[in-house]
């Protein structure tokens, strides 16, 4: 798809930028994916690591699961144990996370340099 075609509304699933923006639309989506890139996590561990409300985390996890980026596994234990992990397409996002980290660190350095002057 041509770049100018991505400017039209309703091109989810056709334009890579609109598609990515939709998938990562939640404020916490990238952080959740980053934490899960380190390996499967339970709900409580994710909540503590990100410092996010239970309702917000639950909504974000449902969205990411619904889009196929994460997998929710319920273990038949008492009490039930639930773990979240990246799906194969979620794992494919790992290089993007690494690029975001690299760019973010460069921008942080830029900000430090900017304020030092």
Image: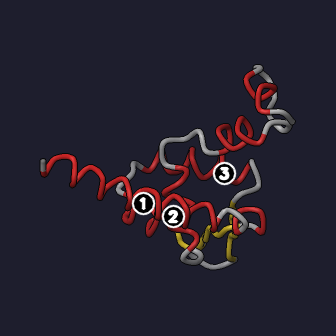
Q: Residue at x 48, y 57 (%)?
A: 31
Q: Quadrant of the N terminus?
A: top right
Q: Is residue 93 above or below residue 80?
A: above
Question: Badge 1 is on which residue?
Answer: 47
In the picture as drawn, the residue positioned furthest to the top comes out as: 9
Crowd band around label 1 with a 10 angstrom C-alpha radius: few (<14), some (14–19), many (20+): some
Assess disc 3: are there few (<14), some (14-19) or many (≥20) residues with their C-alpha within 10 Å of its C-alpha: many
> Are dots 3 and 2 in contact, CB under 8 Å?
no
In this rendering, position of residue 48 left or right of residue 95: left
Q: Is residue 117 left or right of residue 67?
A: left
Which mark, residue 91? none
Q: Please name whichever residue, 98 or 55, is drawn nearer the observer in this view of the structure.
A: 98
Relative to residue 27, is residue 96 depicted above or below? below
Mark 2 — residue? Answer: 43
* Label 3 residue SS: helix
Task: Residue at 53%, 64% (x, y): give it.
Answer: 34
Q: Which residue is mark 3?
A: 64
Horizontal and vertical percent position of residue 99: 55, 62
Q: Nearer the viewer, residue 46 or 113?
A: 113
Q: Are marks 2 and 1 in contact (CB under 8 Å)?
A: yes
Q: Nearer the viewer, mark 1 or mark 3?
A: 3
């Amino acid at each position: 798809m041509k770049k100018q075609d991505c400017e039209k509304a309703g091109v989810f699933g056709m334009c890579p930028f609109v598609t990515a923006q939709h998938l990562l639309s939640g404020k916490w989506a990238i952080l959740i994916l980053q934490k899960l890139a380190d390996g499967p996590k339970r709900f409580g561990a994710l909540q503590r690591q990100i410092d996010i409300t239970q309702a917000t985390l639950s909504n974000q996890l449902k969205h990411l699961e619904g889009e196929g980026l994460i997998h929710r596994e319920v273990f038949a234990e008492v009490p039930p144990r639930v773990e979240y992990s990246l799906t194969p397409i979620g794992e494919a996002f790992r290089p993007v996370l690494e690029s975001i980290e690299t760019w973010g660190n460069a921008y942080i350095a830029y900000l430090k340099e900017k304020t030092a002057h």
